Amino acid sequence: MTKYKFLFSGSGLLVIAVSLLISVGFISSLPSLRIDLTEDELFSLADGTRNIVENLEEPIELIFFYSESATEEQPQIRGYGTRVQELLREIVIASDGNLELTVVDPEPFSEEEDLATQYGVQAVPVTQGGQGIYFGLVAVELDPEKEPALRVSETMPLIRPDQEEFLEYEFMKLVTRVAEPELQVIGLITTLDIDGGFDPMSGQATQQWMITDYIRQLYELRRIETATTEIDEDIDILMLVHPEGLSQETLYAIDQHVMRGGKTIVFLDPTADSLVTRSDEGSLIPAGMSSDLPGLLEAWGVDYASNKVLTDNTLALRVQMGQGSRPVAHIGMIGANRTALAGDDIITRRLENINLSSAGALAQAEGARTRFEPLIQSSSDSMLMDAAVLEDVLDPSVLFDEFVSANERYTIAARVSGVIDSAFPEGRPVPPAVATAPDTDAEQEDTDAAAPVEEVDPMAGHLARTEGETNILLFADTDVLSDRLWVQVGQFLGQRIPQPFANNGDFVINALDNLSGGADLVSIRSRGRYSRPFNLVVQMQRDADDRLRIEESALLDRLAETEAQLAELNMGEDGQPLGQLTPEIQSEIDRFNEELLETRRSLRDVQYQLTADIEKLGSNLKWFNTLAMPMLLTLIALLVNFLRAQRRREVGR
């Protein structure tokens, strides 16, 4: 029996069936075995995710509330729901039993719907008047010693489609908050009145900035004196705001906090506008307008000039310098829009605008071993000016006299990560002993009788390098935290009511959330999108948009020109309006109406041609997929068959 006859015999088919069953069983027994061939590794988990779920001390249940039955006629939502479930299952598989996944379909008026409401997951209507759908995730600790109602839980009420690139990060943040439910401690070192202070001009206490209210809702904020020589180990995140004039002992304490893996967020400023006190008598500009971290920034691989302020002609905010004056562009105040924000970073995701004032610039130092990732950047139409020029600008227009674009993008905020060496290689700085001559013989005798000063070993307990990678967030502006740049604060029944008009607060909270999750959570970057754009169609749409803008611009120019001509024709010799429609004016109106109709016709033609081109491209692709590919495969099969027949004939000879 030839091998071909055996394959198609009963015994052969039985062998094939048994082999398939064994193969399926073997593959099923290895659920963690994956091969990801996608360009952006869409189906591969980050190492940080694996570290988090593998090292959970207590098991956690993930409850995915998903209205599958209510999305039967919503293919896009169903596709997104499938991708979310696939990602959750991948995370559960990687947890090695530390995570459990439960998928719940909350039918109307069911116990499952009550459970979703209990956890804070609400139905969201997809269409007007249509049935609402549930699409949320809850993480609950599975501690058998606790009552179900007392177990720690965190809820993601709605998994939005625009979160697709950051889902892995969001899910891990949820898990981390359940695994570590206690509020993290933020230690604040600042020379500003960010946490409230005293106004010498009015003689009254000043309220804390609204950003501290935001922080206290999510963290324990603890004030640390600027002259401290130790940073307690229970400080999870060290927050430095305008660290001006810190001693070497304080700088060493900050250095050792970083060395032992403590998270750090720093706000520097070449000119802290919030320090300037303005009154009717004039402006009071104190000393210490600039801040720096000498020695530490160099050890972190960062260049920063504390005497230079960033100016930007493209992103300049329009400000009103006096009551009743018209708004003018202030190139020293920057409105960082989406073009200035890192689109693929967790911190700046979905943010629209961040306002800054007299910001500085950060850069990676030459030869630095750390990674330097920009979070906020200026436009290329910017330059660095001396800080003294902007300390008390009353007329922003004078800055344009000094402005010469450097054609370079500068970094305002950045993430620095990696293994860092201590800025104090010789250990703890020891203050020199202060020697004073004794005034009397008695003092001389007391000095001689005094016990010798015990020498302190500067290397005792000194950490020379971080054990692993650490993360530091740096911002070259402190005014980004001040209320005037991002929020209006109202009062209602004794409560402060914030009304944000910029994303400064969201930006700071995102940064703290990112740091609070530890190095593993920080390492999780955005994933690619499953729905990939058709680049050729996108380019065609852009070309059409450009043509439309050109046509519209020409139409608007002609409209302005015609209006000017009509106004001129409508004026008499004495400069007064004629008050009647002359034949010349009517002729000009008729001419413009014809041009208007022709331009609109051209705009429609451009849009029609774009649609026709896209449809033609789609038809060509459909023809290629349905006809050309089968024909190509058929030709390949015929060629292979011909070569085999040719080879058999040669062997037969």
Image (tube, rainbow, N blue to C red):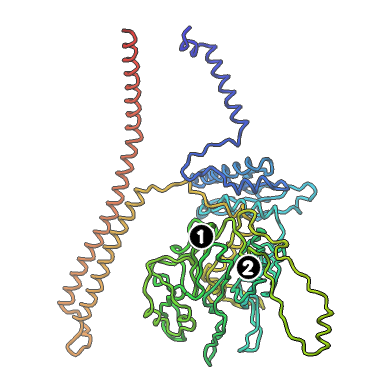
Which callout, 2 or 1, points at the residue further toward the start of the chain? 2
Q: Confirm whether residue 106 shows in the render.
A: no
Q: Quadrant of residue 22?
A: top right
- Say which amino acid is labelled 1: Arg
Seen in the picture, residue 302 relative to 536 is either above or below; the reply is below
For the residue pair 237 and 642, the one nearer the viewer reads as 237
Q: Secondary structure at mark 1?
A: loop
Q: Which residue is mark 2?
A: 239
Q: Secondary structure at mark 2?
A: strand
Q: Viewed as shown, does residue 422 lie left or right of 4?
A: right
Q: Which residue is mark 1?
A: 350
* Residue count near mark 2 (Cα–Cα under 10 Å), binned few <14, some 14–19, many ≥20: many
Q: Viewed as shown, does residue 506 lie left or right of 565?
A: right
The quadrant in which the C terminus is found is: top left
Q: Position of residue 508 (x, y in %)?
A: 58, 66
Q: Residue at x 53, y 67 (%)?
A: 503
* Residue count near mark 1 (Cα–Cα under 10 Å), binned few <14, some 14–19, many ≥20: some
- Say which amino acid is labelled 2: Met
Q: Quadrant of residue 262?
A: bottom right
For the residue pair 400 and 592, the one nearer the viewer reads as 400
Seen in the picture, residue 478 relative to 325 is either above or below; the reply is above
Seen in the picture, residue 15 relative to 516 is either above or below; the reply is above
Q: Residue at x 22, y 84 (%)?
A: 579
For the residue pair 243 and 564, the one nearer the viewer reads as 243
Q: Position of residue 76 (x, y in %)?
A: 48, 46
Q: CA distance from mark 2 to mark 1?
A: 24 Å
Q: In the rendered structure, find residue 517 and report the number of the disc placed on it.
A: none
Q: Position of residue 216 (x, y in %)?
A: 67, 68
